[in-house]
Image (cartoon, grey):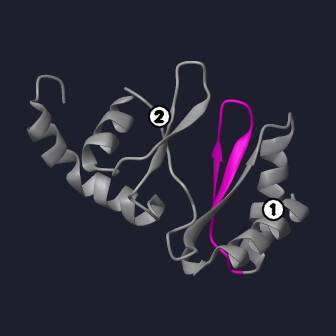
Amino acid sequence: MAGLKKDELLARLRPLVRAYQRLFVNRNDFYARQSPDGRYFLVRKPLTGWHFLHHFQGDFTLGLYAPSQAGTTRWACLDTDAEDGLKQLQKAALTLREWDVAAHLEASRRGGHLWVFLEPVPVKIARTLLQEMARLA
């Protein structure tokens, strides 16, 4: 998509941005952004398609908050940086599959993430699910 103007690129990526927002964005009033040293800082500004465009282009990394303003979430993620973390998460994913819970495993630089996407549920329920996932891992 080299050579495209920003507006044209954003228009082409709009379906991807919308799908990403449906899965991950629980609130639009603030977000986190990664600094060059790897730490994240809070940005108290509205989250827009422009931010996702730059996130997808690798210009910067966004961090999204799981709890909505209503205290619900649509996802839970177990993150591990342990040496055998990916193997542990695979074990938990298999158990969740046996319970008919769809879980999505992804490798990260130092370990992995195990994602579960939900209908909006109270954060307390998602936290309980994460604790159970961690116990299974």
Vertical side of 103 occupied by 98: above or below: below
The image quadrant where one finds the N terminus is top left
The three-letter amino acid code for the residue at tag 1 is: Ala
Q: Using the image, tell me which numbered label, if any, was put on residue 61.
A: 2
Name the foreground residue: 115 vs 28: 28
Say what secondary structure mark 1 lies in: helix
- What residue is shown with label 1? 92
Q: Position of residue 23 (x, y in %)?
A: 45, 63
Crowdedness near tag 1: few (<14), some (14–19) or many (≥20) residues, C-alpha within 10 Å: many
- Inspect the magenta stretch and tell me whether residue 104 lies in it: yes
- Image quadrant where residue 80 sits: top right
- Image quadrant where residue 2 sits: top left
The three-letter amino acid code for the residue at tag 2 is: Thr
Say what secondary structure mark 2 lies in: loop
Nearer mark to the viewer, of 2 and 1: 2
Task: Give the magenta-colored segment's residue range.
Answer: 100-116
